Amino acid sequence: MNHAPFAALLALLSAAAPPETPEAMARGEDRMRDFCFACHVFEPGPGVTNPLHPRITPEKWGTYEKAYENIGNLSRIRPQMSHAFRGNDEDRKALALFLAKLGRENVVPWWRVALPYAGLVLAVVLAGGFLLGASRRSRGRA
Protein backbone atom coordinates (compact mmCIF):
# COMPACT_ATOMS: atom_id res chain seq x y z
CA MET A 1 0.00 0.00 0.00
CA ASN A 2 1.31 3.44 -0.96
CA HIS A 3 1.44 5.68 2.11
CA ALA A 4 2.90 8.72 0.30
CA PRO A 5 -0.41 10.65 0.01
CA PHE A 6 -1.10 10.13 3.71
CA ALA A 7 2.41 11.25 4.63
CA ALA A 8 2.00 14.40 2.52
CA LEU A 9 -1.35 15.16 4.15
CA LEU A 10 0.12 14.63 7.61
CA ALA A 11 3.04 16.94 6.77
CA LEU A 12 0.64 19.65 5.62
CA LEU A 13 -1.54 19.33 8.67
CA SER A 14 1.45 19.46 11.00
CA ALA A 15 2.65 22.62 9.27
CA ALA A 16 0.09 24.99 10.76
CA ALA A 17 1.11 28.56 10.05
CA PRO A 18 3.05 30.12 12.90
CA PRO A 19 2.50 33.83 13.61
CA GLU A 20 4.36 36.32 11.42
CA THR A 21 6.47 37.82 14.17
CA PRO A 22 9.37 40.12 13.31
CA GLU A 23 11.74 37.45 14.65
CA ALA A 24 10.24 34.73 12.45
CA MET A 25 10.34 36.97 9.38
CA ALA A 26 13.98 37.90 10.06
CA ARG A 27 14.85 34.23 10.47
CA GLY A 28 13.05 33.45 7.20
CA GLU A 29 14.96 36.17 5.39
CA ASP A 30 18.23 34.79 6.82
CA ARG A 31 17.33 31.28 5.63
CA MET A 32 16.57 32.71 2.19
CA ARG A 33 20.00 34.32 2.09
CA ASP A 34 21.73 31.15 3.30
CA PHE A 35 19.86 28.59 1.22
CA CYS A 36 18.20 30.23 -1.79
CA PHE A 37 20.83 32.84 -2.62
CA ALA A 38 23.54 30.20 -2.65
CA CYS A 39 22.35 29.46 -6.21
CA HIS A 40 20.06 32.38 -7.07
CA VAL A 41 22.69 35.10 -7.00
CA PHE A 42 22.18 38.83 -7.26
CA GLU A 43 23.16 40.32 -10.59
CA PRO A 44 25.67 43.13 -10.17
CA GLY A 45 24.79 46.55 -11.48
CA PRO A 46 22.30 49.33 -10.95
CA GLY A 47 18.94 48.44 -9.46
CA VAL A 48 20.05 45.19 -7.84
CA THR A 49 16.95 43.37 -6.62
CA ASN A 50 15.89 39.98 -5.33
CA PRO A 51 16.48 37.56 -8.24
CA LEU A 52 13.62 35.35 -7.04
CA HIS A 53 11.05 38.14 -6.90
CA PRO A 54 9.48 37.42 -10.32
CA ARG A 55 9.25 33.70 -9.52
CA ILE A 56 7.58 34.01 -6.12
CA THR A 57 4.02 34.27 -7.38
CA PRO A 58 0.88 34.32 -5.25
CA GLU A 59 -0.40 31.23 -7.07
CA LYS A 60 2.59 29.08 -6.06
CA TRP A 61 3.85 30.73 -2.89
CA GLY A 62 1.05 32.99 -1.58
CA THR A 63 0.03 30.88 1.40
CA TYR A 64 2.11 29.44 4.19
CA GLU A 65 0.91 25.92 3.37
CA LYS A 66 1.93 26.19 -0.29
CA ALA A 67 5.31 27.69 0.58
CA TYR A 68 6.00 25.03 3.22
CA GLU A 69 5.13 22.25 0.78
CA ASN A 70 7.16 23.81 -2.05
CA ILE A 71 10.26 24.12 0.12
CA GLY A 72 10.05 20.38 0.74
CA ASN A 73 9.61 19.61 -2.98
CA LEU A 74 11.93 22.01 -4.77
CA SER A 75 12.76 19.56 -7.56
CA ARG A 76 9.06 19.36 -8.45
CA ILE A 77 8.98 23.12 -9.02
CA ARG A 78 12.16 23.12 -11.11
CA PRO A 79 14.07 19.93 -11.89
CA GLN A 80 17.34 21.90 -11.70
CA MET A 81 16.77 22.37 -7.96
CA SER A 82 17.68 18.80 -7.13
CA HIS A 83 19.07 19.46 -3.66
CA ALA A 84 16.90 19.25 -0.56
CA PHE A 85 16.35 22.11 1.85
CA ARG A 86 19.17 22.30 4.37
CA GLY A 87 17.78 23.20 7.72
CA ASN A 88 15.54 22.01 10.49
CA ASP A 89 11.77 22.28 10.59
CA GLU A 90 11.88 25.65 12.38
CA ASP A 91 14.06 27.03 9.57
CA ARG A 92 11.65 25.64 6.98
CA LYS A 93 8.67 27.20 8.77
CA ALA A 94 10.41 30.59 8.97
CA LEU A 95 11.38 30.46 5.30
CA ALA A 96 7.82 29.44 4.36
CA LEU A 97 6.44 32.43 6.30
CA PHE A 98 8.84 34.79 4.56
CA LEU A 99 8.20 33.39 1.06
CA ALA A 100 4.42 33.38 1.58
CA LYS A 101 4.55 37.05 2.53
CA LEU A 102 6.65 37.84 -0.56
CA GLY A 103 4.20 35.86 -2.68
CA ARG A 104 1.20 37.78 -1.33
CA GLU A 105 2.99 41.07 -1.98
CA ASN A 106 4.03 40.07 -5.50
CA VAL A 107 0.65 40.68 -7.11
CA VAL A 108 0.94 41.83 -10.71
CA PRO A 109 -1.31 44.81 -11.57
CA TRP A 110 -4.04 44.09 -14.12
CA TRP A 111 -2.50 46.39 -16.70
CA ARG A 112 0.82 44.50 -16.61
CA VAL A 113 -1.05 41.27 -17.30
CA ALA A 114 -2.94 42.90 -20.20
CA LEU A 115 0.11 44.69 -21.65
CA PRO A 116 1.34 41.79 -23.85
CA TYR A 117 -2.08 41.68 -25.52
CA ALA A 118 -2.16 45.41 -26.32
CA GLY A 119 -0.21 44.90 -29.56
CA LEU A 120 -2.60 42.16 -30.65
CA VAL A 121 -5.63 44.35 -29.93
CA LEU A 122 -4.08 47.23 -31.86
CA ALA A 123 -3.32 44.96 -34.82
CA VAL A 124 -6.90 43.63 -34.88
CA VAL A 125 -8.34 47.15 -34.70
CA LEU A 126 -6.08 48.38 -37.50
CA ALA A 127 -6.82 45.34 -39.65
CA GLY A 128 -10.55 45.81 -39.07
CA GLY A 129 -10.30 49.47 -40.02
CA PHE A 130 -8.32 48.62 -43.13
CA LEU A 131 -10.82 45.96 -44.20
CA LEU A 132 -13.78 48.23 -43.49
CA GLY A 133 -12.17 51.04 -45.52
CA ALA A 134 -11.36 48.67 -48.36
CA SER A 135 -14.94 47.41 -48.36
CA ARG A 136 -16.32 50.94 -48.55
CA ARG A 137 -13.91 51.89 -51.33
CA SER A 138 -14.88 48.84 -53.40
CA ARG A 139 -18.61 49.65 -52.99
CA GLY A 140 -18.00 53.20 -54.15
CA ARG A 141 -16.46 51.94 -57.42
CA ALA A 142 -19.31 49.62 -58.24
Image (cartoon, helix red, strand yellow):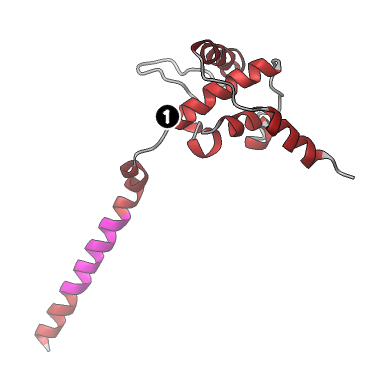
Residue 109 x/y as whole percent: 34, 39
Residue linked to disc 1? 105
**Magenta stretch mostly in which secondary structure?**
helix
- Residue at position x 79%, y 39% in the image: 6
Tell me which segment is drawn in magenta: 120-133
- State which quadrant residue 80 falls in: top right
Q: Residues within 10 Å of mark 1 (few under 14, many from 20)?
A: some
When the figure is inspected, residue 36 is found, relative to residue 116, above or below; the finding is above
Left or right of 132? Residue 124 is: right
The answer, for residue 39, to whether it is visible in the render is no
Residue 126: in magenta span = yes
- Residue at position x 35%, y 16% in the image: 46
Residue 15 x/y as whole percent: 66, 27
- Residue at position x 66%, y 28% in the image: 81
Mark 1 belongs to which amino acid?
A: Glu
- State which quadrant residue 48 falls in: top left
Q: Residue furthest left?
A: 140
Count the marks: 1
- In the image shown, does 89 or 85 lie closer to the viewer? 89
Residue 127 x/y as whole percent: 25, 65
